[in-house]
Image (cartoon, rainbow, N blue to C red):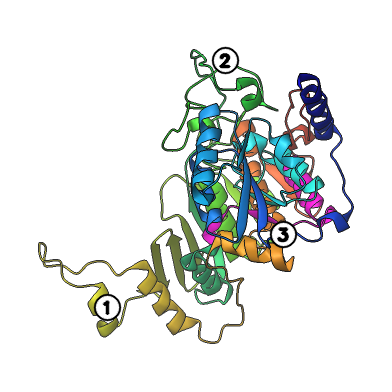
Amino acid sequence: MQSSRRSFLKTIAASAVAPLFLPSRVWSAPTGPNGKLGMGFIGMGTQSRGLLGNFLGQDTRVLAGCDVDTNRRNDAKSKVDQHYGNTDCQAYSDFREIINRKDIAAVCIATPDHWHALVTLAALRAGKDVYCEKPLTHNIHEAIEVMQAVDANQRVLQTGSMQRSMKEFRVACELVQNGVIGKITHVECQFGPPGKPCDLPTDPLEPGLDWDRWCGPGPLRGYSAVLSPRGIHSGFPRWRNYKEYGGGMVCDWGAHHLDIAQWGLGMDASGPVEVQPAAAGADSGAKLVYANGIFVEHKSAGFGVHFFGTNGEVKVNRGRFDLVVAGKSLTLPEKAGEADGKKNKASGKKNKASCAALVQAAEREYLQNPKVRLYVSTTHVSNFMECVKTRKKPITSEQIGGRSAICCHLLNQSYYHNAKLQWDPAKFAFAGGTGDPSWRTRDYRAPWKV
């Protein structure tokens, strides 16, 4: 048995270096005999636990979960087995064991950022559809590779940028694209600082965690509980603050808000042509500049996503929405606002109108017969499931997720090098003698490589 297992692991190790390409006919039917989509989950932290619950409510059959932490992967197995009333779910420490299962047709990836592309590419090349958390990749080179691999392998990929499946963001972008606030001059996006070098002290390593595999393609350093808290932790670990494994808040909240800026500006198939750096030493203030002169500025404070036009403003965040046209803020009609803005008994003041009511009022007032209607998705996971069946592009396909991730990476490179950059979004290359090709990628720790 030990010999057989060693042979198996050698086989899957080789598949990571020379990915398996299967005939498209093998994967033309994404569902199993019972009509349910066989799924595997890779990375079982806080975000994945929420995703697992969502997917279990879909037309799926979750067959396996993978995590480098024994407690996390066993917890995932327990939840799945409890849901189905059996003990069938397998728990793995190596993602390649999921990739090589032919009964798994789709994977959900919620690892730290530095693993996203390697797992995604292995899955795509093995003929699996992919739901991968944002940012889709850890660097520009990986984004290009993933975008190419989806079409080359005729797969469906959804990026976990779920704000596009929230109505307030879609309506905000429709208002912008339909000229309700006039010609757009600029956009402000509020999120935290870029990544920083990891200088954390080393903590004692407890049994049950494969730390070498956690580090994976990134540098192997001493274990830190900040990067990977043991067991079933709450909250979101701070690996995302460090450039070796994440990209700071630029690649966290920035991946969400810059994605909406791209959507509102109609730049999903393109991107900025220039990055203007912030003041030396600053961790906000850099700007993405588009060919039409519009710029998106990274702000440390603000409303989330704030579009400025010659005739007004649109401001949107999760559960928050504001529209100003010709100097006048959108308000609810008296009757419509009665239920939503009843007086607070303690203060005697009216409560703020809800986001949903304001969004509905904006639609009624300005979007009755719009020239531009954007992709409608009401639930991000359901949209992925529907596209797996129809083979259409999801609302945050690899092209959306990849180009939005590139916006994040360009901003970060400007901060890291305090440099003005010119960018060719068609060629995915630095232009005008700026930048360095090495900034598009990273040094990968063997045997991992993209």
> Disc 3 or disc 1, which is closer to the eye?
3
Q: Reading the chain from its start, which is encountered first: label 3 or label 2?
A: 3
**Which residue bears the numbered disc 1?**
337
| Percent x, y of residue 53 | 50, 51
Query: In the figure, residue 142 lies in which quadrant?
Result: top right
**Which residue bears the numbered disc 2?**
222
The foreground one among 314 and 431 is: 314
- How far is mark 3 from mark 1, CA to CA? 47 Å
> Disc 1 or disc 2, which is closer to the eye?
2
Q: Reply above or below: 97 against 268.
A: above
The foreground one among 128 and 324 is: 128
In magenta stretch: residue 340: no
**Which residue bears the numbered disc 3?**
31
Residue 281 shown left or right of residue 26 in the figure: left
Query: Does residue 139 appear in this view?
Result: yes
Q: Reading the chain from its start, which is encountered first: label 3 or label 1?
A: 3
Query: Does residue 272 appear in this view?
Result: no
Q: Reply above or below: 138 against 1.
A: below
Residue 232 shown left or right of residue 217 in the figure: left
Q: Which mark is residue 360?
A: none
Residue 91 shown left or right of residue 307 in the figure: right
Q: Amino acid at mark 1?
A: Gly
Query: In the figure, residue 69 lies in which quadrant?
Result: top right
Q: Amino acid at mark 3?
A: Thr
Within 10 angstroms of label 1, few (less than 14), some, or many (20 or more) residues? some
Q: Regarding mark 3 in the picture, which secondary structure is present there?
A: loop
- The boundaries of the magenta stretch are 141-164
Quadrant in which the N terminus appears: top right
Q: Regarding mark 2 in the picture, which secondary structure is present there?
A: loop
| Residue for point 70% across, 66% down | 389
